[in-house]
Image (cartoon, grey):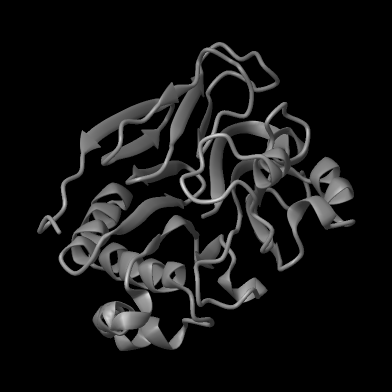
Amino acid sequence: MCRHLAYVGPPIALAALLTDADHSLVRQARAAKHQQSGTENPDGYGVGWWDASTDAAGALHRYRTATPIWADADLPALAQREQATAVLAAVRLASPGLPVEASGNAPFTDGTWLFSLNGLVDAWHDGVGAALRALVTPGRAEQIEGLSDSEVCFGLTLDRLDAGATPGEALRAVVGEITERTTGRLNFMLTDGRTIAATAWENSLFTRVRRDGGVGFGAGAATVASEPLDDDPAWVRVPDRTLVVVDDGTVTSSPLTPTHPV
């Protein structure tokens, strides 16, 4: 069912999020504590980050593989080497009926956006997937590479952003489109490297903002994650069916409701 996280703030090594924390993404992949379906996420992973190095400051990079995150021999060096001012990363447990391939792994990217879905859209193979994909504008639909529900949800999100919606408004609208037709676990995460927007819908979500630094993160660091990375008391659980937006160190929450209860 996946685990994901996003970070914005002072430069940090990817290792602080992916490998070194007490309950890093590597550990969440093998021993999730709050996951609603399954406890392991063996179907690959991905990470996108904004480079903090002097030579490439601000450049957006992405790495994805179908190899389990705990088995990727390239990860330790990558995670220690790369410094980032913003990150979105996810480990995957593929939804039933979807192939295990890198194209299905978050983060999905377009321009300055990174996106992830922790969950699934119910009845995807029973007509719902086709109906939702038909709502994506032709230009966006042509850019969809794989077969995952996540990538179609990203296309719908991008259409809303293209129309002038804020990140939070875009995610709220996509939740509405889906819940008009079906149920699901719809924990979305979206960032442009400055703002994080995320939804908690039938799966766990936590936020942490460090205004005074500490716990390996500088002042102003903000993290949104499926599970806390450690036992820091600054972690706050997001109530179910809630939209959160983290902007300039401030967390704003608002309720989400299904368009038509099903």
Using the rendered image of the protein, determine whether residue 52 is visible from the camera's viewpoint. Answer: no
Residue at x 51% of width, y 36% of height: 34
Please state if 202 lies on the left or on the right of 33 as rendered: left
Residue at x 12% of width, y 57% of height: 259
Using the rendered image of the protein, determine whether residue 227 is visible from the camera's viewpoint. Answer: yes
Query: Front-most of 190 and 41?
Result: 41
Please state if 95 lies on the left or on the right of 131 as rendered: right
Does 17 appear above or below 202? Answer: above
Query: Front-most of 23 and 245?
Result: 23
Query: Front-most of 50 and 131?
Result: 131
Q: Position of residue 175 (x, y in %)?
A: 25, 57
Residue at x 29% of width, y 41% of height: 243
Point out the residue furthest to the left here.
Answer: 260
Q: Position of residue 253 (x, y in %)?
A: 27, 32
Q: Position of residue 22 (x, y in %)?
A: 72, 26
Q: In the picture, residue 171 is in which quadrant? A: bottom left
Q: In the picture, residue 105 is in which quadrant? A: bottom right
Please state if 242 lies on the left or on the right of 155 as rendered: left
Query: Front-most of 245 and 259?
Result: 259
Does 164 appear above or below 242? Answer: below
Does 66 appear above or below 83? Answer: below
